[in-house]
């Protein structure tokens, strides 16, 4: 993509900010840096926020955010400051965030908003940032942020920031149920009581790693239905919030396979055979807690971004 913005132009773009599911999430040991060593399968889904950005190069940096939902310490503002400092660009940036992704639900909404900002501002400033540098900036904002620079289906290792692409999965339909229960990510990790280990992998981890590897290798040949997908947070979080386990059981009764929690919760999801089946299942829940979604492939993710940034790139 070529950028052709003159320094005094004002530009407006509206970019999508998709949510994610963790189709599988294994937490290994606690690391000496305080984070946990993970293995996870990320997948972007069609549930999305929308971020409108007005950008103009200015004498002094000024960042304003108007959001449909009040959010303390918004990651969009932090991401904008970080990326403008990195670019050594001063600008007046006005964001309007239309929030549709439930917050604190394990759907990556805040992280996705941050990544959207990191991807959009360099294009708006006409100064692309090499991908490795952008990933390094993303990591400082949160463990899930780098994934949203890629989208699609991806394998997350380490803190969740070491990412490798996986073949895009076929189109799937899911029903996300977010009841509004708040789970603190840090507390959810604490509740797992993982040991601190210096070695990346140990004999304790091998059975988990073997199972996870088998899933990763079978992803493009065996349907999600047949795979023993797992989220290691479920036992600990379900013990504190039994209502979430009941939602998973209900999704299974309604025909979902698999049905599980995403991230450290509290949203749960079920995969259904079709959009119609997912919508039918939604009618069994109270209004306002269900989100019928489909998977968004990496190709679709990129196309949406390319289109959204066209006004900034002279297309
Ligand atoms: O990176 P992020 O800010 O999203 O992480 C929130 C908290 O979750 C961290 O402060 C840490 O307590 C915990 N965490 C962890 N291991 C990870 C990711 C997050 O322990 N891989």
Image (cartoon, rainbow, N blue to C red):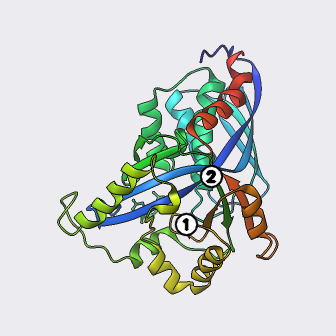
Any part of residue 143 in sight:
no
Q: Which mark is residue 106?
A: none
Any part of residue 270 in sight:
yes
Task: Please state if 156 lies on the left or on the right of 120 as rendered.
Answer: left
Task: Please state if 283 lies on the left or on the right of 238 as rendered.
Answer: right
Residue 231 image offset from top left, x and y in percent = 45, 68
Q: Nearer the viewer, residue 120 or 200?
A: 200
**Residue drawn at 71 percent across, 23 percent down:** 310
Quadrant, the C terminus? top right
Residues at circles 2 and 1 in contact by the CB criterion of under 8 Å: no
Q: CA distance from mark 2 to mark 1?
A: 12 Å
Note whether 54 is above or below 74 in the view shown.
above
**Residue drawn at 28 percent across, 60 percent down:** 210
Q: Which picture quadrant has residue 60?
A: top right
Q: Which picture quadrant has residue 282?
A: bottom right
Give the secondary structure at mark 2: loop
Which of marks 1 and 2 precedes in the sequence?
A: 2
Give the secondary structure at mark 1: loop
Q: Which picture quadrant has residue 179?
A: bottom right
Residue 121 image offset from top left, x and y in percent = 62, 32
**Residue drawn at 56 percent across, 74 percent down:** 183
Give the labeled residue for mark 2: 172
Q: Nearer the viewer, residue 56 or 42?
A: 42
Quadrant, the N terminus? top right
Crowding around mark 2 (Cα neighbors within 10 Å: few <14, some 14 to 19, many 20+) is some
Crowding around mark 1 (Cα neighbors within 10 Å: few <14, some 14 to 19, many 20+) is many
Give the labeled residue for mark 1: 258
Residue 13 image offset from top left, x and y in percent = 75, 31
The quarter of the picture showing ligand 1: bottom left
């Amino acid at each position: 993509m070529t950028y052709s913005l003159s320094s005094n132009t004002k530009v407006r773009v509206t970019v999508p900010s998709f949510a994610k599911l963790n189709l599988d999430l294994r937490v290994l040991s606690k690391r000496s840096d305080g984070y946990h060593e993970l293995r996870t399968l990320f997948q972007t889904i069609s549930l999305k926020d929308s971020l409108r950005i007005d950008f103009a190069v200015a004498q002094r940096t000024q960042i304003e955010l108007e959001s449909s939902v009040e959010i303390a310490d918004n990651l969009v503002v932090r991401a904008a400051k970080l990326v403008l400092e990195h670019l050594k660009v001063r600008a007046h940036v006005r964001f309007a965030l239309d929030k549709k992704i439930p917050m604190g639900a394990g759907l990556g909404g805040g992280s996705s908003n941050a990544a959207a900002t990191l991807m959009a501002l360099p294009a708006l400033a006409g100064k692309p940032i090499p991908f490795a540098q952008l990933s390094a900036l993303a990591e400082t904002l949160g463990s899930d942020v780098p994934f949203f620079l890629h989208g699609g289906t991806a394998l997350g290792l380490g803190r969740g920031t070491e990412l490798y692409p996986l073949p895009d999965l076929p189109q799937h339909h899911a029903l996300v149920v977010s009841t509004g229960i708040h789970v603190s990510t840090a507390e959810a990790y604490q509740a797992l009581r993982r040991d601190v280990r210096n070695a990346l992998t140990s004999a304790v981890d091998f059975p988990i790693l073997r199972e996870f590897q088998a899933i990763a290798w079978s992803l493009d040949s065996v349907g999600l239905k047949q795979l023993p997908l797992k989220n290691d947070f479920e036992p600990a979080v379900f013990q504190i919030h039994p209502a979430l386990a009941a939602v998973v059981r209900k999704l299974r009764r309604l025909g979902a396979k698999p049905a599980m929690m995403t991230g450290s919760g509290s949203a749960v999801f079920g995969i259904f055979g079709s959009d119609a089946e997912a919508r039918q299942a939604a009618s069994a829940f109270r209004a306002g807690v269900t989100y019928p979604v489909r998977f968004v492939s990496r190709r679709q993710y990129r196309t949406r971004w390319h289109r959204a940034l066209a006004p900034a790139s002279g297309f």
